[in-house]
Image (spheres, rainbow, N blue to C red):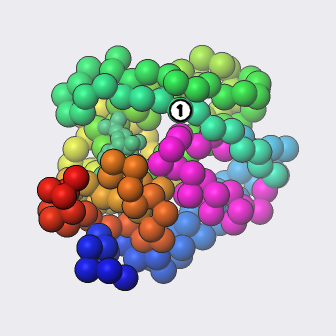
Amino acid sequence: MSDNAPEVLISEDRIQTRVAELAAQISSDYGDIAELVMIGVLKGAFIFLADLSRKLSIPRTIEFIAISSYGKKSAPSGAVRLVMDVRGNIEGKHVLIVEDIVDTGHTLKYLMGMLGSHRPASVKTAALVRKAESAEVDVTIDYLGFDIGDEWVVGYGLDYAEQYRTLPYIGVVKPANIQAR
Ligand code: 5GP
C-alpha cells in the first residue's frame, strides 16, 4: 500500500464479516419468497450489491438505478434527479434498495417514493454506511452495515472524483491527496 493510500476506517475483514451478517439476516427475513429484486444505486453501490447478492440464500434478481443530486447539505429534497430507471417491471415484487452510503437521507427518501409508485409488494432498504449525525430527513434503513462520523469516505465502491472505488476497505482521503487534485 502506498503512502498516499487513504487511511483505513473500516477494514476489508470487518466489511466482509458485516456483509455476511446482513446477507444472513435478509435471507432469514424474506424466508421463502419467490424472488427478491435487489436494486443497486449506481455507481457507489456496485461492489456492496455484488458481495451482498452473492451471499444470499434466497432467489434474487439484480437491477440498477442511477440518480444525480444537485448540491449537498441543506439541498431541498427535490434536488435528486433520476438518470436511469429500472429496466424490469417491479409491480407486485419485493424490492430491496441497495445504497452505498446515506448522508442527509434525501437520496434514499426520493428513491423510496419513486420506486413505491411502481406498486411493488414491499420496499426495504440496505445501506453499507450511514452518517448518523448528518441526517436531514427521517428514512428507515432496514439493513445497515456501519455508522460513521461526518467525513468523506472512499473505497468499496465509493469515490473521490472517480478515484478509489476499487479499494477493498473504506477509508478517509488524506488532505494531501485532495489538494493534489
Ligand atoms: P444523501 O442524499 O443521503 O445526502 O447522499 C447520498 C449520496 O451522497 C451517496 O449515495 C453518495 O453518492 C454521496 N455521498 C455522501 N457522503 C459520501 C462520502 O463520504 N463519500 C462518497 N464517496 N460519497 C458520499
Relative to 59, does residue 41 appear above or below in the rendering? above
The image position of residue 83, as x and y in percent, is 52, 24
- Does 105 sit left or right of 165 as displayed? left
Q: Residues within 10 Å of mark 1 (few under 14, many from 20)?
A: some
Residue at horizontal 44 percent and vertical 25 percent from the top: 110
Residue at horizontal 52 percent and vertical 49 percent from the top: 45
The verdict on residue 80 being magenta is no
Extent of the magenta region: 38-58
Relative to 175, does residue 131 appear above or below in the rendering? above
Residue 180 appears in the figure: yes
- Does 45 sit left or right of 26 as displayed? left
Amino acid type indicated by mark 1:
Ala
Picture quarter with the N terminus: bottom left
Count of marks overlaid on the render:
1
Which residue of the protein is positioned furthest toward the front in this rendering? 180
The verdict on residue 42 being magenta is yes
For ligand 1, give the image quadrant: top left
Residue at horizontal 60 percent and vertical 17 percent from the top: 117
The image position of residue 43, as x and y in percent, is 51, 44
Residue at horizontal 19 percent and vertical 28 percent from the top: 74
Disc 1 target residue: 66
Q: Quadrant of residue 36?
A: top right
